[in-house]
Image (cartoon, coloured by chain):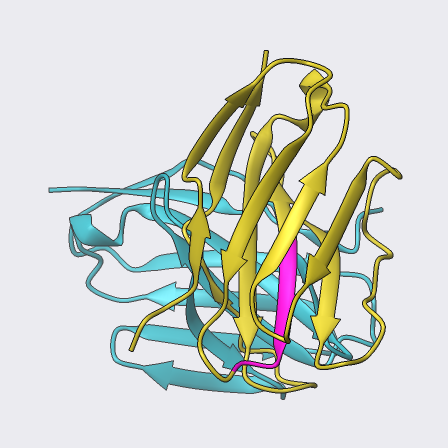
């Protein structure tokens, strides 16, 4: 079946602009995660959605970052007033149920802030 | 001390070699231990996971966990050039994973 998809695959934006990154999880998966991967760094957890529960936002680095998940499916990560240090690959993952550690990743969105 | 430590490499081996990739961790609350493989410009792909100390084998891959030492390993037998990738270890607690920085593996023909 279809895996996790993300769009756009690449995004170049000017410093100070807002960007929206989209994630379509695997159909039927209830949990959705956003991570950030910077050059030479591991995956940094950003936010976690599980069903209709309040999201775990503990990994968001600043209030310029926000995310929503509509209808328990598609998610959008928004970065406002982008900074050069926001340049990274943003990865989305989904898993079948709460408590499952088997996370399946999308290909990522490569964000470059100039 | 970071929760998960992983040597970034690169680790270069000839085709057919046995590869050993390792991670150490500090949080004894971790319950699940996983290995992901990430090819260049792709998302991580789940390779193996285990939740107990001991070995788990899947084809050419063996995952080993030693909870008493807080040490996990991934062994790759008969390594192939197609195994060239970055290998990420990850530890699970509740519903979240903490990742190592990844080890880059290069298998030369």
Question: Does residue A32 belong to the magenta stretch?
Answer: yes
Q: Name the residue: 37% across, 47% down.
A: B42
In which image quadrant can residue B70 be found? bottom right
User: Can you give x and y, in whole percent of width and height, for residue A64 in the image?
Assistant: 83, 35
Nearest to the observer: residue B33 or residue A79: A79
Please provide percent x and percent y for residue B20. 42, 58
Q: Which residue is at a point 60% across and 33% down the rendered structure image?
A: A38
- Residue B43 against residue A2 in the figure, above or below: above
Q: Which chain is cyan?
A: B
Q: Give the magenta range.
A: A29-34
Q: State the residue in front, A64 or B53.
A: A64
Residue B28 percent location from the top left of the image: 83, 74
In the displayed structure image, the side of residue B60 where residue B55 appears, left or right: right
Image location of residue B8, percent across then percent down: 53, 39
**Which quarter of the picture shows residue A94?**
bottom right
Q: Which chain is yellow?
A: A
Quarter the C terminus of chain B occupies: top left
């Amino acid at each position: 079946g279809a895996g996790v998809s993300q769009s756009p695959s690449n995004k170049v934006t000017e410093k100070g602009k807002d960007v929206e990154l989209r994630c379509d999880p695997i159909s039927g998966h209830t949990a959705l995660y956003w991570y950030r991967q910077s050059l030479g760094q591991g995956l940094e957890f950003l936010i976690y959605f599980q069903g209709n529960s309040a999201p775990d936002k503990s990994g968001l680095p600043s209030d310029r970052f926000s995310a929503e998940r509509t209808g328990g499916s598609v998610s959008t990560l928004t970065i406002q007033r982008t900074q050069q240090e926001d340049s990274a690959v943003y990865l989305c993952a989904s898993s079948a149920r709460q408590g499952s550690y088997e996370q399946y990743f999308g290909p990522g969105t490569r964000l470059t802030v100039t | 001390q970071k929760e998960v430590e992983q040597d970034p490499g690169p680790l270069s081996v000839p085709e057919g070699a046995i590869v050993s990739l390792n991670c150490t961790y500090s949080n004894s609350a971790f319950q699940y231990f996983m290995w992901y493989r990430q090819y260049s410009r792709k998302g991580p792909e789940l390779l193996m996971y285990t939740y107990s100390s001991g070995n788990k084998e899947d084809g050419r891959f063996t995952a080993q966990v030693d909870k008493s030492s807080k040490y996990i390993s991934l062994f790759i037998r008969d390594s192939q050039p197609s195994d060239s990738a970055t290998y990420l270890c990850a530890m699970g607690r509740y519903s979240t994973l903490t990742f190592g920085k990844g080890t880059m593996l290069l298998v030369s023909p």
